[in-house]
Image (tube, rainbow, N blue to C red):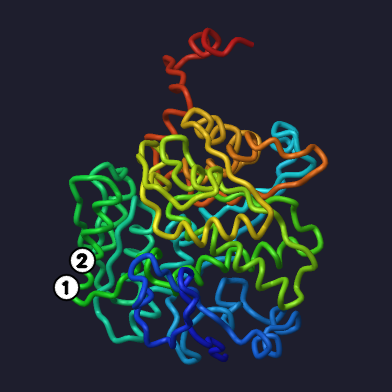
Amino acid sequence: MLNAVTGLRCVVCGTTYGVDVPYTCPSCGLEGILDVQYDYERIARALTRDALARRPRDHWRYRELIPIAPDASLPPLQVGWTPVYEAPRLAQKAGVRRLHLKDEGRNPTASFKDRASSVGVVKARETGQETIACASTGNAASSLAGFAASVGLKAVIFVPERAPDPKVTQLLIFGATVIKVKGDYAVTWELCQRACERRGWYNRNCAVNPYLVEGKKTCGLEIAEQCGDAMPDWVAVSVGDGCTIAGVWKGLVEMRRLGFIDRLPRLLGVQAEGARPVVDAFRGKRDLVPGPANTFADSISVGHPRNWRKALKAIADSGGTMVAVSDAEILEAMRLGARLGGVFGEPAGAAALAGVMRAGIAKSESALAVVTGNGLKDIRGAMEAVGPPLVVEPDLAALDKVLPL
């Protein structure tokens, strides 16, 4: 395997640095998110259709496009190659020609974030660090806890006070040190950032660590390979910090550049009405202004997204758009995704489907919604989407009363 990384480019000033720069642009600070650059001609000679056909179906099959050492030791948990399901009844409900769901809940800790965490623990071990930390509204935290446990790293995880209990339980069962911060995601993130700087921990936060987005982009690489000539017209992705949609787009663009697909989809970025600063920046054609974070979809409850520039550029480059959906629409999408598509998504995952419902996509067009996490991640949210079960005495007469023949 080869490492074809040529440098790290700042999204603000455009300066390209060597790989020795640890996280963000030295000149632009935290705003200077870096983007990994590659020698694609070199990659094209190694990453061919024949080569892929011989490789295991996980996200390491694209190793030439993942910035890790050629001899890096990989975590044992299988990540990626999550299924894409066609959902004709959902398509009819959404008023589109065809609709697919990519079920990221099939990853080891049941969310999309495993793609980033798997790269994070590899990079931490490459640099010889024993402790890796992150701030998270839930999924990145449980993902990091699981992957750190799988390779013997210590994990310190900062979560907002309102993080759902099932997600916090995952952290604890994996043996992570959990710091519950009194406040929202923004203050939680700031505390984690300062702690990493002071204590020398490896920083898994995607907003500052350029390598983590490279793990997320494998979802886009997979969509391209799985869909091929049947590439949908739209790919819908929920947006929190902005890293996920930026990563998916980068993967799609790379697969076109390498000749695996002929055309690119448009991106549909979806935020919750209660946490919509990226939507407002997109519609206002302006820089991001931090706003409130008030939605039950905890994974996208982000009032101060850090990777908004990459997100907005990805959406603009794709010719796509953004929508905001209410919590009620997300709840309805949770029900519809499960009942008409057989995929039980958590609120943030269902938000992408809610966006497809709201966006007014033409009836002649097709869409794929990335369901970023399993619904069991947030049972409280799921219970809001459904009514209580029927309770009966243990006899048929009682059953007939509540369930007539």
| Residue at 51 percent of width and 52 percent of height | 372
Measured Cα–Cα span from mark 1 to mark 2? 6 Å
Left or right: 248, with 362 as reference point = left
Quadrant in which the N terminus is drawn: bottom right
Above-or-below relation of 26 to 244: below
Secondary structure category for the residue under label 2? helix
Above-or-below relation of 131 to 402: below
Along the line of sight, the residue nearer the viewer: 311 or 215: 311
Amino acid at dot 1? Arg
The residue singled out by tag 2 in the image is 194
Amino acid at dot 2? Arg
Above-or-below relation of 285 to 328: below
Residue 196 horizontal/vertical position (percent): 23, 70
Q: Are marks 1 and 2 in contact (CB under 8 Å)?
A: yes
Secondary structure category for the residue under label 1? helix
The residue singled out by tag 1 in the image is 198
| Residue at 44 percent of width and 85 percent of height | 17
